[in-house]
Amino acid sequence: MAVTAPPIDIGIPAQQREQIAAGLGRVLADSTVLYAKTHGFHWNVTGPMFNTLHLMFMDQYTELWTALDLIAERIRALGCPAPFGGSIYAGLSSVPEAEGVPPALAMVRELVEGHEAVARTIRAVFTTADEANDQPTADLLTQRLQIHEKTAWMLRSLLEA
């Protein structure tokens, strides 16, 4: 006789878990596109700020890479499949891909806008998680929100005169 898994019973109804997972899928897509953009900028930055930006972008894409797993694993813990694949992410993400290789400070501006876009996506999902009394998702989103807002501020500081 085969042993099967029991239905998920974590105190959040299936419909709410699916709504939260869908929102987290958008956060995952935004984060993945932002990761790829940041990594690409790391490879391609040039100019007088090369070393500073090259190292800063490396720290940022490394942090984003780690976050992708945390977000996807939360989606799985809610009982839903984590989205994956370039075309899927393109359809879910609010972060546009880079067009060509912009100059260094334009890269910084694009990353500010990317981190702010992820923050907006997170805020929208936070409401759904909060209404479902889903503290683990709310905690994850709060941590991600703090990182994206701080990173946007630090990058923006490079652009202010």
Image (spheres, grey):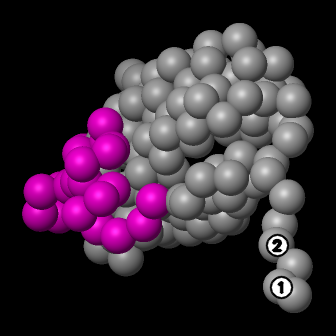
Residue holding disc 1: 2
Say whether residue 120 is left or right of residue 107: right
Q: Which residues are magenta?
A: 83-106
Q: CA distance from mark 1 to mark 2?
A: 6 Å
Which residue is nearer to you in this view: 58 or 123? 123
Q: Is residue 84 above or below residue 49?
A: below
Seen at 38% across and 39% down, the residue is: 114
Which residue is nearer to you in this view: 152 or 9? 9
Seen at 63% across and 58% down, the residue is: 72
Q: Is residue 26 above or below residue 4?
A: above
Q: Which amino acid type is marked by label 2?
A: Thr
Q: Is residue 27 visible?
A: no
Quarter occupied by the N terminus? bottom right
* Image disc number at residue 4: 2
Q: Is residue 88 visible?
A: yes
Q: Residue furthest front?
A: 1
Q: Which amino acid type is marked by label 1?
A: Ala
SS for tag 2?
A: loop
Labels 1 and 2 touching (C-beta < 8 A): yes
Instruction: State yes or no: residue 55 in magenta.
Output: no
Residue 74, image x and y in percent?
Answer: 72, 51
